[in-house]
Image (cartoon, rainbow, N blue to C red):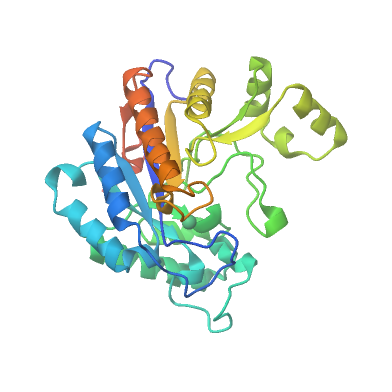
């Protein structure tokens, strides 16, 4: 656990990707990116208040016209590039080498990169890593699996490709009912295994009762247990899972997740959202122009609060204090 006196740190991780049809399955040809200008504006607005962004970019974004323009504009601005980290986000259904067996629609099972055979997962991430290095002129060291889908082969693949940090853990959540990973035994603790630092996407079991928050933080698996007694207990203590995200959560919710987790000893926080949410009509969270304005203001309001009232600092993911540095 980090020292109690350390100032809190915030990394903003943007899942930077194509405009995915959230109810349409995993279509290899659905690769449109039309929100490049809005994303650049959001990153610039955050920079104005000193905030840093980690753009976890997928293949469709990195190879799109607007994506490349966005990357080039960030790289061309000395001040802006100091506030941005380019990281990798693997959506296997749009990332070459594409499967010849599923040309129309990739089955849900293979939407999680960690479920692919090892050579396929490696080849896709290797292709993405090279594409990011070419477009952004720096090799990514931070990895975010598409749909949080890390698997048993992912750690050695990451190590082989030079990655140092994985931010794919989504604490408390069990995705096995949809073929995904089971994170129900994980809370927000960072840990280092085989030279890769795992820094989970900040989430919290919120409840008005401090003992309940403490209980679930220490026994995360208790939250998703399906027994009747657990269900009743969760209802009695009004326990709910909140992610530190502007998507579906209010500014107050976001502040509460941060305050509650700070009380439990957490010092490094990840705020996350999907890049298409910065523009109207592209994700279920932002359906109108007014909601897009509200969304962007909420992100800025949270960042301002974190800096000015919560007395925190902004970092890129790769600048987490526990990231191992090469010793040779
Ligand atoms: Zn994604």
Q: Nearer the viewer, residue 151 or 33?
A: 33
- Rendered view: 285 above or below 110: above
Residue drawn at point x = 32 percent, y = 43 percent? 53
Q: Position of residue 243 (x, y in %)?
A: 54, 37
Q: Nearer the viewer, residue 73 or 148?
A: 73
Q: Which residue ends up furthest to the right in the rendered image?
A: 228
Residue 138 seen from this side: no
Residue 118 seen from this side: yes
Residue drawn at point x = 31 percent, y = 27 percent? 313
Q: Which residue ends up furthest to the bottom in the rendered image?
A: 100
Q: Position of residue 128 (x, y in %)?
A: 37, 66
Q: Which of 174 and 305 is in front in this view?
A: 305
In this picture, residue 168 sits left or right of residue 326 = right
Question: What is the total number of numbered labels drawn onto the structure image?
Answer: 0
Which picture quadrant has residue 84? top left
Q: Position of residue 259 (x, y in %)?
A: 49, 21
Which picture quadrant has residue 76? bottom left
- Rendered view: 288 above or below 312: below
- Rendered view: 317 above or below 258: below
In this picture, residue 83 sits left or right of residue 212 = left
Q: Where is residue 245 in the image (x, y as percent from the top left)?
A: 48, 38
Residue drawn at point x = 44 percent, y = 37 percent? 270
């Amino acid at each position: 656990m980090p020292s109690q006196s350390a100032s809190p740190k915030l990394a903003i991780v943007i899942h930077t990707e194509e405009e995915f049809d959230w109810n349409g399955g995993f279509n290899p040809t659905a690769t449109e990116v039309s929100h490049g200008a809005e994303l650049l504006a959001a990153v610039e607005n955050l920079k104005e208040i000193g905030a840093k962004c980690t753009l976890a970019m997928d293949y469709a974004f990195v190879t799109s016209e607007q994506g490349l323009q966005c990357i080039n504009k960030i790289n061309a601005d000395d001040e802006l590039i100091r506030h941005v980290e380019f990281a990798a986000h693997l959506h296997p259904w749009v990332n070459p080498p594409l499967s010849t067996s599923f040309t129309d629609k990739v089955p849900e099972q293979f939407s999680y990169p960690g479920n692919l055979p090892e050579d396929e997962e490696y080849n896709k991430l290797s292709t993405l890593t090279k594409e990011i290095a070419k477009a952004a002129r720096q090799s990514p060291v931070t990895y975010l699996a598409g749909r949080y889908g890390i698997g048993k082969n992912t750690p050695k693949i990451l190590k082989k490709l030079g990655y140092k940090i994985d931010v794919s853990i989504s604490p408390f959540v069990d995705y096995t009912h949809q073929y995904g990973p089971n994170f129900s035994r994980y809370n927000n603790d960072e840990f280092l295994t085989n030279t890769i630092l795992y820094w989970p996407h900040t989430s919290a079991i919120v409840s008005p009762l401090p003992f309940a928050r403490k209980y679930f933080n220490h026994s995360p698996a208790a939250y998703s247990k399906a027994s009747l007694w657990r269900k009743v207990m969760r209802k009695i203590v009004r326990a709910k899972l909140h992610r530190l995200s502007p998507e579906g959560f209010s500014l107050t919710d976001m502040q509460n997740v941060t305050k509650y987790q700070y009380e439990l000893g957490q010092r490094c926080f990840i705020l996350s959202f999907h890049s298409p949410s910065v523009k109207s009509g592209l994700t279920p969270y932002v359906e109108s122009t007014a909601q897009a304005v509200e969304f962007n203001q909420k992100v800025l309001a949270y960042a301002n609060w974190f800096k000015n009232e919560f007395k925190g600092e902004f970092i890129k993911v790769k600048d987490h204090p526990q990231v191992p540095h090469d010793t040779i």
